[in-house]
Amino acid sequence: MERIRAPAVFSQRKRQKGRHSPNPACSYEIKFNKFVIFIMQRKMGMTRRTFLMELARRKGFRVESELSDSVTHIVAENNSYLEVLDWLRGQAVQDSSRFELLDISWFTACMEAGRPVDSEMKYRLMEQQDQSLTSNTSESEVPSFTASKVSQYSCQRKTTLNNFNKKFTDAFEIMAENYEFKENEIFCLEFLRAASVLKFLPFPVVRMKDIQGLPCMGHQVRDVIEEIIEEGESSRAKEVLNDERYKSFKQFTSVFGVGVKTSEKWYRMGLRTLEEVKAEKTLKLSKMQRAGFLYYEDLVSCVSKAEADAVGLIVKKTVHMFLPDALVTITGGFRRGKKIGHDIDFLITNPGPREDDGLLHKGLLLYCDIIESTFVKEQLPSRKVDAMDNFQKCFAILKLYQPRIENRSYNASEEFDMAEVKDWKAIRVDLVISPFEQYAYALLGWTGSRQFGRDLRRYATHEKKMMLDNHALYDKRKRIFLKAGSEEEIFAHLGLDYVEPWERNA
């Protein structure tokens, strides 16, 4: 629970602990003196709160680290009006009427506008919002589930591949990707979380009432939904698709080994297309990027389930040559039931003595980039929701001969008769080596989806006071690591109903 500046006893106790200064040193100019913002940490976490405060200060807002008499606006995320009031009472604040109690969507709107926006009704936390938002709707219009019971965490929802709201989620994912290219984590996650909620719905959204009471429906999201309902498409998503920077980044990041940082560098150099990148003589490409361009057409094409199965047989056969008892498990989208993907992930572990350390050096692949393990025993799980794990891993390209694929209209004799016919396909493969005692955690993390994993870690942190990553689960209250021999045991430790892999497509 957060402590505040008022009354004075709280302020003194906070200073004794030496934590947040009530007036943090800041070189940013305050442009909007009439607005004094306090961001609640409850259900948000310290890292995200710190990031949001820094963002607001950079844009000229005055943000207090602690609640004080000068605060005018309190911003909360995933907290109801009554929850905020209860929190304020716990801080000995009797009169909450002097504050504007606002949802995080107001803060998001301010950051996007670069100035304070009006605290309209849609942004305010009010008692009426805690009551049924569909009380004025006829029973026939209400979906056959209770919207208010939909969890903000996708790990408490079972999401299959049946998406009744693809026109909305496609638009959200375009918006999220654009914000990811701009390295704007706040807006990116806002759209990804909204997409995750709509993928869960067992019915298509046809009117705004259908989303009342649902979590993660901020003002930006609602605006996009409303426009699609009324116009059939999102002008904002369309604008992004036609944006020069977005189109360039989309091309650049499609190359194996190219991320947002490299894309930014190329864009600043004046490069706009892959043809221009390849023609730029002064550009020094990494080994991974050269392989990405060499096999580009294969790598950007979809990988089928049949191809994934064929690669699985090759990987298992080769691993078992060195480690007969090793477990080789396909993870990622294919484990979640998807029929196509863009790469194939495998988790490898060996029961018994550690003999897998040198496995990735045995010469399995034509191209590979091996990342050695950096795991330290008894290391606490990472606090970062998207942190990369410390397993030994290999990002590789495998040469798959097409005759290995079943149900394919391919004449195997042609590979001998026509030398010019390419009889193989380059496929992206990620191999991850996990110690056997960490296998359950590694399997859970590498199965995904990415949003499911994010929410699972957020849930562990905010609801259970635990720390979860791909290596371990740590109980901060008991100060112990919780062992698990299966994914089911991890869910049990967290007090969650087990979610099957094919129900994790958040």
Image (cartoon, grey):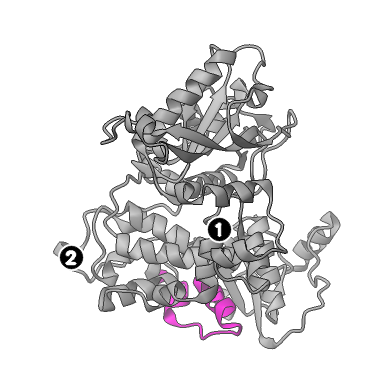
Residue 344's spot in the image, x, y percent? 47, 38
Give whichever of 328, 154 is nearer the camera.
Answer: 328
Depicted 404 relative to depicted 277: above or below: above
Position in image of residue 430 (x %, y %): 55, 37
Number of residue marks? 2
Q: Which residue occupies 44% across, 54% down?
A: 152
Q: Nearer the viewer, mark 1 or mark 2?
A: 1
| Closer-to-camera residue (109/289) | 289
| Magenta-highlighted residues | 99-127
* Residue 471 left/right relative to 376: left
Q: Amino acid at mark 1?
A: Thr
In the picture, the disc for residue 155 is none
Q: Is residue 486 visible?
A: no
- Mark 1 crowd level (few <14, some 14–19, many ≥20, 10 Å Cα): some
Name the residue: 50% across, 25% down.
Answer: 315
Q: CA distance from mark 1 to mark 2?
A: 43 Å
Q: Residue at x 32, y 58 (%)?
A: 147
**Mark 1 highlights which residue?**
253
Looking at the picture, tell me which residue is in the foreground, 262 or 53. 262
State the mark number for residue 141.
2
User: Does the magenta-highlighted stretch encompass residue 62?
Assistant: no
Going from the N terminus, do you reach mark 1 or mark 2 first? Answer: 2
